[in-house]
Image (cartoon, grey):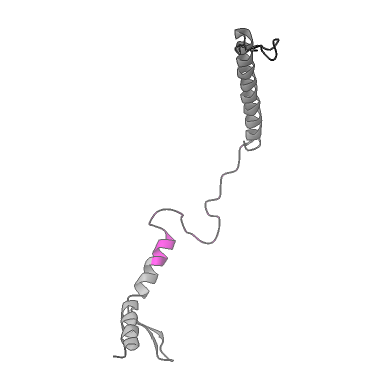
Amino acid sequence: MSEPRRPAVRLAEDHVPARVAYGALAFVVVFGALLVFWAWILYSGSLREFRAERDLPAAPARRSAVGERLFGTSGSGWERLRLQEEGLSRWRWADREAGIVDMPIEEAMRLLVEEAEGR
């Protein structure tokens, strides 16, 4: 009664020979090294496009009519900003004939607030 259903089929442990495992590992390492080498060749070749093959001329000292510097706190741009800030903090005639006066911005904001509050 307890006869096996398929007597030719039996369980066996999975076993990968060491030679096959080491061969697969060696293949992966060599293939990876070839990919890295190929990427390096492509990368170094693409850099050649950006390298100067001759001496480049010196950059002009001034590129435009505007004499501003990108960094720092000196130069004509900063001087102009300082003068504009001074202009916003003092009284002066904008148009004497029309009776238009520039006033300090703080004073103008205070007057606007008072006007809005109905004082």
Q: Is residue 116 left or right of residue 9?
A: left
x then y, percent, for residue 60: 55, 50
Instruction: Please report the bounds of the magenta region as a residue range.
Output: 55-81
Q: Is residue 64 left or right of residue 54?
A: left
Q: Is residue 11 left or right of residue 94?
A: right
x then y, percent, for residue 109: 34, 80
- Which quadrant of the rendered structure holds the N terminus? top right
- Which quadrant of the rendered structure holds the C terminus? bottom left
Residue drawn where x is 66% and y is 36% of the image: 49
Is 9 part of what is drawn in magenta? Answer: no
Is 56 part of what is drawn in magenta? Answer: yes
Residue sitting at the far left: 119
x then y, percent, for residue 69: 46, 55
Residue drawn where x is 35% and y is 84% of the image: 112
| Helix, strand or loop: magenta stretch | loop
x then y, percent, for residue 24: 63, 15
Q: Relative to 50, does residue 90 appear above or below in the rendering?
A: below
